[in-house]
Image (cartoon, helix red, strand yellow):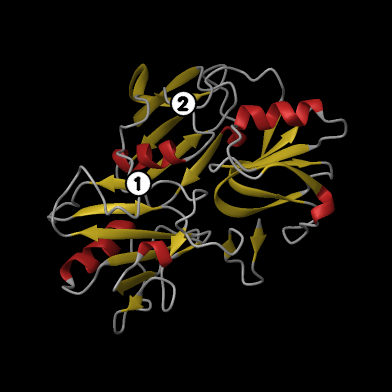
Amino acid sequence: TSVTSTGASTISTTSAATSTRPAPVIFPPIEGGSANWVFHLGLNCWEEHGAVSLPDSNPLLGTYTVEECRQKCEIHPDCEAAVIATHVSTPTFPCFLRTRVEIAQCRSYADFDVWEIQRTPSTTSLSSSTTSTSVTSTGDFVPIDGGIDRACRGVSSGDNNPSYYVIQNGISDLDGCKAICVLDALCQGIEYSTGRCELWVRPGGIEATAAVQGFICLRYTGAPTTTQSPWSFVPVDGGVNRVCRGRSPDDNLPSHYTVAASSGMSLDQCKAECAALAGCRGIEHNQGGRCELWVHSIGATRTLSGYVCLRFDA
């Protein structure tokens, strides 16, 4: 994996249409709207890379919630996609409006998401150049302890270690929170309250809840594993959407790791390879099945959508 000096992350030099990019997710119309949306996580489209910027929209003046940015796109007759820069840790984000969109030519980018508008409603298919995934196509979300007015916890109602979950900003509803969980390789379930989405990535899953009004706790049955791994792997900096680094976020020397597989390897298989390798310190794995076995101490991470970084606690 590589990251540019500006902090924008890329996956090699391939286009965003490669298998390493998560499948798009279809969303229903926003409140007051009529168009469906196709959500592309960790993608960016711009001039000569799959899109053209609309006038005075690169970005729009001010910042917006995800729903507000999509509204701006829907009311503009020429808008084909809203691009949202999610790198800022605020409730609102820079919003870019694009036209002449060719998703296959867009690029994988950390901290950017593309919302492609489908002005003719369709929930069954996309163009032949992409493969779609509905929000409920993989596994189900099951209420824990009734789900409603419950907050997720680890082994007990008081076990709420921040390393157990990753907070997703800008998710406006429960369905959006579910969709992001489906895309994340480690997500075991979600805790949702208005404007706040926690993806629970604790290896042992969600084992308890606490009574908190206005919260919902759901277990995701489509998770890669819902039981404790036979090996102890600890998420680094939250684990999800992180690539491993050495002493600093820019320290990615090839000597730090061995590539066990460039594609096609499951997360559990990657863990097993690490456990069998003397001196393995951890793994970096992506949704396309790339597995890096880190033999150098993992002291830092960097953001990159679709990846996980786990430290091996031998």
What's the residue type where badge 2 is placed?
Answer: Cys
- Asked whether, in this view, residue 212 is left or right of residue 309, the answer is left
Q: Nearer the viewer, residue 137 or 207?
A: 137
Quadrant where the image shows the N terminus: bottom right
- Is residue 239 positioned above or below 229 on the image? below
Q: Residues within 10 Å of mark 1 (few under 14, many from 20)?
A: few
Report if residue 287 is visible in the image: yes
Tell me the quarter of the picture where residue 147 sits: top left
Q: Marks 2/1: CA distance?
A: 32 Å
Residue 131 disc label: 1
Residue 42 disc label: none
Task: Estimate the x, y position of residue 228 in percent, counting from the top left.
Answer: 61, 18
What's the residue type where badge 1 is placed?
Answer: Thr
- Is residue 29 positioned above or below 9 on the image? above
Residue 152 disc label: 2
Kindly state the secondary structure of the residue where label 2 is placed: strand
Kindly state the secondary structure of the residue where label 1 is placed: loop
* Identity of the residue drawn at 40% across and 46% down: 23
Report if residue 247 is visible in the image: no
Among the two numbered marks 2 and 1 on one chain, the one whose residue lies closer to the N terminus: 1
Total numbered circles: 2
- Asked whether, in this view, residue 195 is left or right of residue 109, the answer is left
**Farthest-out residue, front:** 128
**Farthest-out residue, right:** 279
Q: Nearer the viewer, residue 193 or 104?
A: 104
Tell me the quarter of the picture where residue 288 sits: top right
Task: Estimate the x, y position of residue 134 in percent, counting from the top left.
Answer: 29, 39
* Identity of the residue drawn at 47% across and 27% down: 223
Q: Residues within 10 Å of mark 2 (few under 14, many from 20)?
A: many
Task: Estimate the x, y position of residue 139 in percent, counting from the top left.
Answer: 37, 26
